[in-house]
Amino acid sequence: MNNKLSQNLIDGWLGELELNFALRKGTSVLTKCKHTGPFYVKKSFYSKNDNTPHVYLLHPPGGLVGGDKLTLDVKLESGSRALLTTPGSSKFYRSNGICAVQKHTFTLERNTALEWVPQSSIFFPKTKAKIDTTFIIEQGSRIISFEMLCFVNSSLGIYIYPEEVDVFLNICLSNSVGLQERLQINESNCIVKLGGFKISALLFAIPSDEKILDTVRKLITSVKHFQIGGATLLDNILVVRLLGNDNQCLKKILCRIWYAIRPFVIGREVTIPRIWST
């Protein structure tokens, strides 16, 4: 057994993926795709009415255990656009005492458009996980991003929480303070921090204004059987937070918000990733 493989078995699997998008003859294309380990993409997909490439991030193991690390580095060159998603939920399994780590870095050069809409992250009992996401956004660029974090496994009829989950978000803007936040969840504080709910969802969009904020607030209050949620505007950053217990219900709300604001933020109607229907 070679030393690299032996070290992987001891420390966990490392997956690295580096993507670069650029504008070529009026169409955004994937110009660089470099990967290490079980983390890659096969190709870009385009719809008939939108030249935005849809890229599906593939992680064949289907989940992470303690010691595993996935690193994603995405760059959009000036004028380009892209939509990135995952074919299924990211699963964090029981830890061996070491954290499972996801690190995402997105760099948006001037006048680019990015949609980062992964499916939910699910944290199983006794999970130790860290998710670190940074967006570096230059002037004139646009972005919509959302995520759902599922903290409780109730399949046995009781609530079992993850051991420790640390989620860090950093939005760096060239003309604004941006946003930094950190959510730390563990077995002892999960109920208090989540108000008794199992799932936390976050959506943000740049640039946004009072009109978009008003639209989103009306949409949230119009949803029946919804538990708790709100929206605010920090400079030109729309921030939406939702709490609930129904994964599908929260995903529908996030998608409805996405449908409503995309024409104003991105400049086009939503085209749902085909992988979500398979």
Image: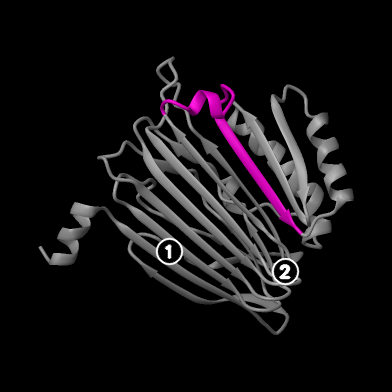
Q: Secondary structure at mark 1?
A: loop
Please tell me in which quadrant of the rendered image residue 70 appears. bottom left
Residue type, label 1: Tyr
Residue type, label 2: Ser
Residue 203, position in %: x, y?
67, 46
Residue toward you, 65 or 169: 169
Q: Is residue 142 inside the magenta stretch?
A: no
Mark on residue 67?
none
Left/right placement of residue 278 relative to residue 231 reads: left
Residue matched to label 2? 141
Residue matched to label 1? 40
Mark 1 / mark 2, whichever is N-terminal? 1
Q: Is residue 184 above or below residue 153?
A: below
Does residue 254 show up?
Answer: yes
Furthest residue in direction front, as rendered: 177
Residue 119, position in %: x, y?
55, 46
Q: Is residue 113 above or below residue 145?
A: below
Q: Quadrant of the N terminus?
A: bottom left
Does residue 269 show up?
Answer: no
For marks 1 and 2, give the one nearer the viewer. Answer: 2
Q: Is residue 194 above or below residue 203?
A: above
The residue drawn where x is 35% and y is 38% is: 93
The residue drawn where x is 77% and y is 43% is: 232
Left/right placement of residue 8 relative to residue 210 reads: left
Q: Is residue 188 inside the magenta stretch?
A: yes
Furthest residue in direction left, as rendered: 1
Q: Which residues are magenta?
A: 187-206
The residue drawn where x is 37% and y is 32% is: 163
Q: Secondary structure at mark 2?
A: loop
The residue drawn where x is 81% and y is 47% is: 260
